[in-house]
């Protein structure tokens, strides 16, 4: 959330020149976050919410909503009482409803030259549409707030929609505020994003191969899966693979926390098979690329098979539902 205020100044006799184009660039408040996002394909969609209207008598300007954001015109008419967080959310909701195009889409490190006005900024991944990068988050009054997110290999970064006024005045505290009367107008503005992040979730694939199938039964293999990060178990599960008419099978498990070390152990090899090779622990370094675990078994040349029961537990909010599968 950028620290941006847009209250016009009324202190000088010389009006600000709004014919001059402005430069807008972006940076992150947290250096660690910045380094990760600078390596990503993050871009920022910039939407023009309002045009800047010059006051011919004072060193100030007001706003007039663009056609796409005309429902915000009443709020923009009295800037002294505006809740800018609410204004940002209302502008973002208009964008989320569709039909509004950005005036620019720019990379994190690249400045964009645009005319004076009030702009909404919404970051997302370059390869993803904004519509696919929006979260609607429920708030206490029963409404939703709009967030956008950017994914890197390990993290999902969340951004509040933010407004910035161009030109503006940079105060001693670093804030952009058009009411900073004792400083000059800034036509080149660095907008600072405040952002939160959390680990993403990825997936693993367990692949099973046997040298041959025989007999009347269906061989079944049982695996214990754990994931550990920073000394804490963050995922635990048990899964089975049954082979009915082929020597190969696999199962995919999702919801594995990125950045964790995943260990898959074959705890039951089948009554007629022995384990000949298996994959050791792997680190899930990229949530977009499933980890592959390979397990190969050799037959004992016996016709002994078994029946297994696979229980899946789902939390329904009050208790657990059990889905039982007999193999």
Image (cartoon, rainbow, N blue to C red):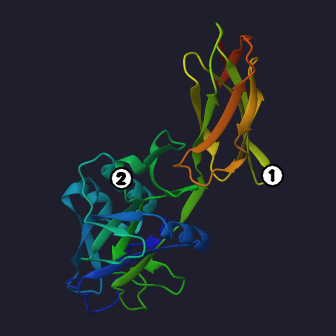
**Can residue 273 be seen from the camera position used here?**
yes
Q: Which mark is residue 319?
A: none
User: Quarter of the image holding residue 208?
Assistant: top right
Check the image and report above or below for 44 versus 327: below
Check the image and report above or below for 235 versus 17: above
- At 36% across and 52% down in the image, what residue appears? 130
**Can residue 83 be seen from the camera position used here?**
no
Q: Which mark is residue 231?
A: 1
- At 48% across and 85% down in the image, what residue appears? 171
Q: Nearer the viewer, mark 2 or mark 1?
A: 1
Q: Nearer the viewer, residue 102 or 326?
A: 326
Q: Nearer the viewer, residue 268 or 19?
A: 268
Q: Is residue 265 left or right of residue 89?
A: right
User: Quarter of the image holding residue 305?
Assistant: top right
Q: Is residue 327 left or right of residue 131?
A: right
Spot occupied by residue 121 in the image (x, y as percentages of width and height): 38, 64
- At 58% across and 57% down in the image, what residue appears? 197
Spot occupied by residue 291 in the image (x, y as percentages of width and height): 60, 45
- At 61% across and 55% down in the image, what residue appears? 285
Check the image and report above or below for 183 versus 283: below
Q: Secondary structure at mark 1?
A: loop
Q: Categorize mark 2 by other alpha carbons within 10 Å: few (<14), some (14-19), many (20+).
A: some
Q: Secondary structure at mark 2?
A: loop
Q: Which mark is residue 130?
A: 2
Label 2 and label 1: CA atoms lie apart by: 36 Å
Q: Is residue 213 left or right of residue 169?
A: right
**Quarter of the image containing the C terminus?**
top right
Work out which residue is located at the far top of the displayed protein and give it. Answer: 216
The mark that comes first in sequence, 2 or 1, is 2
């Amino acid at each position: 959330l950028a620290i941006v205020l847009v209250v016009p100044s009324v202190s000088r006799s010389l009006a600000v020149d709004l014919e001059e184009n402005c430069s807008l660039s972006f940076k992150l408040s947290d250096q660690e976050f910045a380094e990760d996002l600078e390596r990503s394909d993050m871009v920022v969609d910039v939407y023009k919410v309002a045009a800047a209207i010059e006051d011919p008598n004072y060193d100030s300007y007001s706003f007039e909503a663009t056609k796409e954001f005309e429902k915000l015109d009443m709020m923009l008419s009295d800037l002294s009482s505006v809740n800018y967080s609410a204004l940002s959310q209302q502008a973002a909701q208009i964008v989320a409803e569709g039909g509004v195009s950005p005036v620019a889409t720019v990379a994190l490190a690249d400045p964009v030259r645009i005319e004076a006005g009030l702009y909404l900024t919404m970051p997302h991944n370059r390869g993803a549409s904004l519509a696919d990068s929006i979260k609607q988050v429920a708030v206490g009054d029963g409404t939703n707030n709009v967030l956008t997110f950017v994914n890197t290999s390990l993290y999902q970064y969340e951004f509040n929609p933010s407004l910035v006024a161009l030109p503006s005045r940079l105060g001693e505290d670093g804030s952009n505020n058009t009411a900073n009367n004792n400083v000059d107008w800034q036509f080149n503005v660095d907008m600072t994003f405040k952002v939160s992040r959390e680990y993403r979730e990825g997936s693993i694939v367990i692949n099973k191969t046997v040298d041959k199938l025989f007999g009347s039964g269906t061989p079944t293999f049982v695996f214990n899966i754990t994931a550990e990060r920073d000394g804490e178990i963050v995922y635990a599960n048990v899964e089975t693979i049954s082979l009915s008419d082929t020597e190969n099978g696999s199962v995919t498990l999702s919801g594995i926390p990125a950045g964790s070390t995943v260990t898959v152990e074959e705890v039951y090899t089948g009554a007629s098979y022995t384990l000949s090779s298996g994959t050791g622990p792997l680190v899930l370094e990229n949530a977009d690329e499933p980890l592959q675990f390979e397990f190969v078994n050799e037959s004992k040349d016996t016709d002994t098979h078994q029946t297994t029961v696979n229980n899946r537990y789902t939390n329904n909010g009050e208790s657990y539902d059990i889905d039982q599968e007999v193999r």
